[in-house]
Image (cartoon, rainbow, N blue to C red):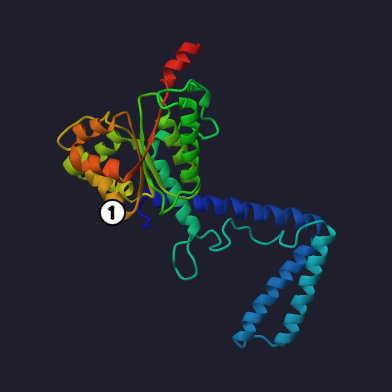
Amino acid sequence: MALEGKLLARARDRLEERRRVNAAETVRRRTETYARIPELRHIDDRLRGIMIELVGLALGRSDRPGQELEEESLALQARRAELLQRYGFPADWLEPIYSCPDCHDSGHLADGKTCACLRELYTQEQTAELSPLLRTGAESFENFRLDYYPLEPVQDGESPRRHMERVLQACRAWALNFGPNSLNLLFSGGPGLGKTYLAAAIARVVSASGHSVAYDSVGAVLAVFETQKFSRDSSEAADAAARARQVLGCDLLILDDLGTEMNTGFTAGALYTIINGRLVAGKKTVITTNLTADQLANRYGPQLASRLLGDFHRLDFRGKDIRLSRKESL
């Protein structure tokens, strides 16, 4: 994953804030502990002095034997540990605090590579940037209301509630086990049946596991690609191009409400580019739509319909429009 631009700057700012908070806590602990146990300050000052002498010894600038310095250091460390234990402090109480033990909150490892902690922060910023539909609301699998779905069996002998219970279980399992071998998902069914809700629940779980997630309406995503291609404003086009790269490259793309976007000559081609490009790259996509299989073929043509119906695992949503059910219950 290439880290770039304003998202990387935000991730670094968050890492710097962690470093600042940890440094302040380290100072607070030392100040309070030294006030309570003054001998510890003298021990730490002397230990630092011994380190300086050892460096000087290596450079031929110290008259004291190295063994003598090391023995004094070991004795001081033992006394330090004894005092900390006597006063009920853990052995590492006065050591520098780091959120990441691998890079010490610098964001970079000893070999110069980017640390996983900075990559994780970048992924979180990328998800926040690319998923405006997740910025409000608290959609979760736990809060999904099965009681809105009828218990009465329909034509196949299964009730909508039982069917949606299985859909809920499938979505939860998919999100918890998200990875390179995951299927692409197509949520289909009438309006108000919970497709958008469960897509958001998936996005939250997958993003919380450290994967980058883009979640937005199909119309909004297509607008980005249209701006990239047709905008005469170079800055606007560059921003759109960066976002388009993120949409194509994120671990999980959720396209909500396929079929509600404006149907233009640009739409089908752009959608095919997005979906096919992600399939070829092995990236995972979840799509929600109110359209039937025949309607998808009629609207987007056989090429895109073949991708949607052949390369995606379809989950049918059944029941009565939840929004209408809520109104009726008022």
**As displayed, is residue 161 above or below residue 223?**
above
**As displayed, is residue 147 above or below residue 71?**
above
Say which of 215 and 295 sits in front.
295
**As displayed, is residue 265 above or below residue 98?**
above
**Does residue 37 appear to the left or right of 2 in the view shown?**
right
Residue 233 visible (yes or no): no
**Does residue 4 appear to the left or right of 37 in the view shown?**
left
| Residue furthest to the right | 86
Residue at position x 51%, y 26% from top? 146
- Image spot of residue 5 (x, y percent): 35, 51
- Image spot of residue 194 (x, y percent): 43, 28
- Image spot of residue 84 (x, y percent): 79, 61
Residue at position x 81%, y 64% from top? 39
Residue at position x 26%, y 40% from top? 224
Say which of 24 and 316 sits in front.
316
Which of the 4 image quarters holds residue 187? top left
Secondary-structure class at tag 1: helix
- Image spot of residue 259 (x, y percent): 27, 30
The image shows a total of numbered marks equal to 1
Q: Which residue is mark 1?
A: 280
Q: Amino acid at mark 1?
A: Val
- On-image quarter of the N terminus: bottom left
**As displayed, is residue 12 above or below residue 301?**
below
Badge 1 crowding class, 10 Å Cα cut-off, few under 14, some 14 to 19, many 20 or more, is: few
Residue 75 visible (yes or no): yes
